């Protein structure tokens, strides 16, 4: 066996003023979306905002359910809505953040594995990288260009052939 090393690239900043204006604007939309989450069980309200090449921004928030697995993450709510409404538009960027009641989350909340897989699928479909911006309620923001930095060695449609 040959041992290999993967390098993941991302940038981070503790100051939202240092973000690109478009990234900061998308993160603001994600914060607004988080406030609309339906998260009565976790009180961990996640918001996502998807920026499309047609200029539209589609938001999503996590939707929980008493039958827990029936709920869905904010990222997939937003991505599926965006792809349903604008199937021919390129997904340029996705911002993700959270809102809680009783604590301040200072660490960036990154997309879960299932959402990463969905992001990777859309990236392969559109053949253009997706920029992912994520933060906690305060503190550091992380920016990643391209899903190879969040989900390397991805399972894709090519694996089905
Ligand atoms: Zn998720």
Image (cartoon, rainbow, N blue to C red):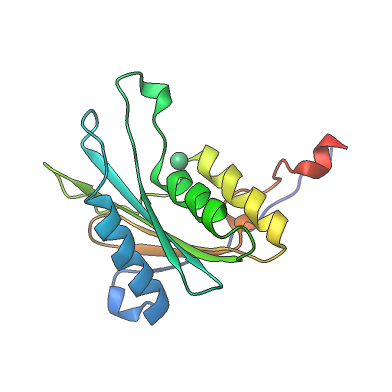
Q: Quadrant of the N terminus?
A: top right
The residue positioned 42% from the left and 25% from the top of the image is 70
Q: Position of residue 47 (x, y in %)?
A: 33, 52
Picture quadrant of residue 102: top left
Q: Position of residue 81 (x, y in %)?
A: 48, 50
The residue positioned 25% from the left and 35% from the top of the image is 39
Q: Quadrant of the C terminus?
A: top right
Residue 160 vs residue 106, the one in the foreground: 160
Q: In the image as oriented, which residue stretches furthest toward the top? A: 67
Quadrant of picture, ligand 1: top left
The residue positioned 25% from the left and 40% from the top of the image is 44
Residue 60 vs residue 117, the one in the foreground: 60
Q: In the image as oriented, which residue stretches furthest toward the front? A: 85
Q: Position of residue 85 (x, y in %)?
A: 52, 56
Against 81, residue 39 (above or below) is above
Tally the numbered discs: 0
Q: Position of residue 87 (x, y in %)?
A: 61, 57
Picture quadrant of residue 49: bottom left
Q: In the image as oriented, which residue stretches furthest toward the right? A: 161
The residue positioned 29% from the left and 73% from the top of the image is 16
Against 6, residue 62 (above or below) is above
């Amino acid at each position: 066996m040959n041992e290999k090393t993967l390098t993941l690239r991302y940038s981070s900043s503790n100051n939202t003023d240092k973000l690109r204006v478009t990234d900061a604007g998308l993160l603001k939309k994600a914060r607004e979306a988080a406030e609309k989450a339906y998260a009565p069980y976790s009180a961990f309200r996640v918001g996502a905002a998807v920026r499309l090449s047609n200029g539209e921004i589609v938001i999503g928030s996590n939707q929980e359910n008493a039958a827990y697995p029936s709920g869905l993450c904010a990222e997939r709510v937003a991505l599926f809505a965006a792809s349903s409404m604008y199937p021919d538009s390129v997904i340029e960027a996705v911002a993700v953040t959270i809102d809680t009641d009783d604590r301040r989350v200072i660490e960036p909340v990154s997309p879960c594995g299932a959402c990463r897989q969905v992001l990777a699928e859309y990236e392969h479909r559109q053949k253009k990288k997706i920029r992912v911006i994520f933060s906690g309620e305060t503190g550091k923001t992380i920016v990643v260009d391209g899903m190879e930095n969040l989900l390397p060695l991805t399972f894709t449609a090519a694996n089905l052939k």
